[in-house]
Image (cartoon, grey):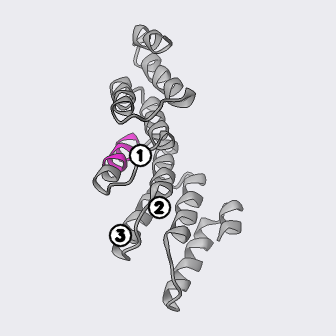
Amino acid sequence: LTALARSKRPDIAEHVVHWMSSVSAEVNVYHFNVLVNAFAKTSKWLKAVQLLGTMEQGTVEMDVITYSAAISACEKGGEWKMALELLSTMGEDMVEIDIIIYSAAISACEKVGDWIKALGLLHRMAETKVQSDTIACSAAISACEKGGEWLRALGLLT
């Protein structure tokens, strides 16, 4: 599966997983994570998100890697609302939200210039004691810039 994902053939990897299921082979979170990552890397955000639904139906628990890949897929596809929805679902599922996930969600907001949501996520990071990094801050600054909020962007530099 990993080789198919690396060669940007998530469609074939998905067929392999379906075949595994059909012959009663164990299909677990690792297999789905490879698939979600593969679809994320090929900018097929909708397919990545649909796989989360497939996991729920098959009682395969999603983990931080699953959500991270799906949120990144949404970010690459400019689907910031879906990225934030997945972030919310993570909290409901009691999956720990780390800096990588916050950064992907902030980047999704940045792509559409939604500085309010980007700054809200930075604030939420601080509240939940997740240490911000250069990627998260840069994306938030860029969101402020795109939204014409240069004073807020400057405030993030301090």
Rendering coords of residue 1 (x, y %): 64, 71
Label 1 sits on residue: 97
Circle 2 sits in a helix, a strand or a loop, which is it?
A: helix
- The 10 Å Cα crowd at callout 1, few under 14, some 14 to 19, many 20 or more, is some
Q: Nearer the viewer, residue 150 or 128?
A: 128
Identify which amino acid the numbered label 3 is placed on.
Glu
Rendering coords of residue 84 (x, y %): 35, 43
Disc with the residue nearer the chain's start (1 vs 3)? 3
Q: How many marks?
A: 3
Alpha carbons under labels 1 and 2: distance apart = 22 Å
Image height of 55 relative to 145, above or below: below
Rendering coords of residue 92 (x, y %): 28, 53
Q: Which residues are magenta?
A: 80-88
Label 3 sits on residue: 56
Disc nearest the viewer among 2 and 3: 3
- The 10 Å Cα crowd at callout 3, few under 14, some 14 to 19, many 20 or more, is few
Q: Residue at x 41, y 72 (%)?
A: 60
Circle 1 sits in a helix, a strand or a loop, which is it?
A: loop
Identify which amino acid the numbered label 2 is placed on.
Lys
- The 10 Å Cα crowd at callout 2, few under 14, some 14 to 19, many 20 or more, is some
**Looking at the image, which residue sits at the far bottom?**
23
Alpha carbons under labels 1 and 3: distance apart = 19 Å
Identify which amino acid the numbered label 1 is placed on.
Ile
